[in-house]
Image (cartoon, coloured by chain):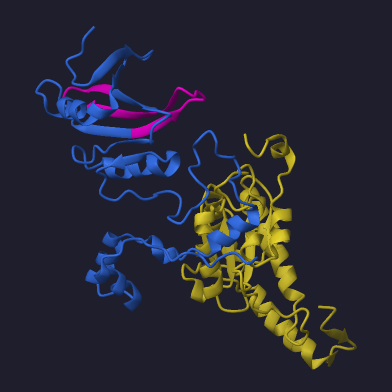
């Protein structure tokens, strides 16, 4: 709570009003995230394990899973995203009210993973802005929990009064893209083992 | 060995003991009808339809039908070879087995084989405006023909509601739960037509 203010004595607290507001708002937001699960593959099984009693992300204020995007705060894409689902996840993201965050869970959601082929989106950050990437194939529940805690940290660094740190809508451009085409091509480049595969093979 | 199956060219026994029948393309429906309706054959269940492409100029593609007789508990495979010189087309067996509908659509989607007489031959796995070709063909590049940016652009410009079939729309209509624009489509009898994505910026 260092950013809030400085405790001079036990009787009063010195802080900027804006920081107090931010602290109150961000703590409320971070500790009551309502997840919108978008489970497409095996990561969704680990996601369910994270939600269930042994790991239980309700401990971090995610008690209520929102199966409607209109009452959700954080979109968790658990699994690979085929191109056919790209407009679907974009619409779900657009339907979520601000402030909203996105967790990309697993190697496939983050990069396309082993599916470097014609049917798969090479990282959901070409479709929606991503806040936290959780690596793993699939990530263990501890990994997802760590990602959620990182998101808490990120939320607590935001500010309502600072345009740089404030969350704003990120609409698609006139071509219907989120990023410039060159950027999409660049982040979709093959890497790792798939550089040894020819484009025509 | 002459086979009683009409249009049969030759018969083989696969390594797992199953019978494979090669049938002339023109007589596929005759052979299938015989296999389905002849007493003692009774192949009443079409398990799967798929295709095989060879890296061979002479024989382009084989369409493979897996049949099963549920009463007799026997299987048979029927294969049709499509010549490379001709259009990739074969008669649809939808009139014999209604289950062939989606199976043949999948072969059409992945291999580009046209099934004559199919009631609703359109893509089933890829979206209907998918313009890159037929993914399981040998000539198809693993990562598709377009750049990743173009693929993302085309994918994001699909209207997801355009994928609803007429059946799905009429179920929603029966529940009184259909937006006006879709009700119009239902009344026009349009099925699963997606508006073309806007042309790429130069």
- What colour do you see for chain A? yellow
In this picture, residue A1 sits left or right of residue B111? right
Residue at (28% x, 61% y) in the render: B166
For residue A170, which quarter of the picture?
Answer: bottom right
The boundaries of the magenta stretch are: B49-76
Foreground of the two, A9 or A200: A200
Residue at (76% x, 84% y) in the render: A163
x and y, in percent, of residue B140 in the image? 55, 39
Residue at (50% x, 36% y) in the render: B137
Q: Residue furthest front?
A: B85
Does residue A63 appear anywhere in the picture?
A: no
Q: Is residue A91 above or below residue B61?
A: below
Residue at (32% x, 59% y) in the render: B165
Chain for colour blue:
B
Q: Residue furthest right?
A: A8
Q: Is residue A173 above or below residue B37?
A: below
């Amino acid at each position: 709570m260092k950013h809030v203010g400085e405790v001079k004595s036990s009787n009063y607290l010195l802080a900027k009003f804006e920081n107090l507001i931010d602290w109150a708002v961000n703590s409320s937001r971070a500790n009551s995230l309502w997840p919108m699960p978008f489970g497409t593959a095996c990561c969704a099984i680990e996601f369910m394990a994270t939600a269930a009693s042994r790991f239980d992300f309700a401990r971090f204020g995610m008690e209520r899973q929102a199966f409607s995007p209109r009452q959700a705060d954080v979109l968790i894409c658990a699994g690979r995203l085929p191109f056919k689902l790209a407009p679907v996840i974009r619409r779900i993201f657009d339907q979520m009210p601000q402030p909203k965050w996105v967790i990309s869970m697993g190697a496939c959601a983050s990069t396309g993973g082993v599916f470097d082929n014609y049917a798969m989106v090479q990282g959901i950050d070409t479709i929606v802005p991503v806040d936290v990437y959780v690596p793993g194939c699939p990530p263990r529940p501890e990994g997802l929990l760590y990602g959620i805690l990182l998101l808490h940290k990120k939320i607590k660094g935001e500010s309502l009064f600072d345009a740089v740190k404030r969350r704003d809508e990120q609409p698609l451009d006139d071509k219907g893209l989120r990023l410039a085409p060159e950027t999409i091509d660049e982040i979709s480049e093959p890497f790792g083992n798939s550089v040894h595969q020819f484009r025509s093979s | 060995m002459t086979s009683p199956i009409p249009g049969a060219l030759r018969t083989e026994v696969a390594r797992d003991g199953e019978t494979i029948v090669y049938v002339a393309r023109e007589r596929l429906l005759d052979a299938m009808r015989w296999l389905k309706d002849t007493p003692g054959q009774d192949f009443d269940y079409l398990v799967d339809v798929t295709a095989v492409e060879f890296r061979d100029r002479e024989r382009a593609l084989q369409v493979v039908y897996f049949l099963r007789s549920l009463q007799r508990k026997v299987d048979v495979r029927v294969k049709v070879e499509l010549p490379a010189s001709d259009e990739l087309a074969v008669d649809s067996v939808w009139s014999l087995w209604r289950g062939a509908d989606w199976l043949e659509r999948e072969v059409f989607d992945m291999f580009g084989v046209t099934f004559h007489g199919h009631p609703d031959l359109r893509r089933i796995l890829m979206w209907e405006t998918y313009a890159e070709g037929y993914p399981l063909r040998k000539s198809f590049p693993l990562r598709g023909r377009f750049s990743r940016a173009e693929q993302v652009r085309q994918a994001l410009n699909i209207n997801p509601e355009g994928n609803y079939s007429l059946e799905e729309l009429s179920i929603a209509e029966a529940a009184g739960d259909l937006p006006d624009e879709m009700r119009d489509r239902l009344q026009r009898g349009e099925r699963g037509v997606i508006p073309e994505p806007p042309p790429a910026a130069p």
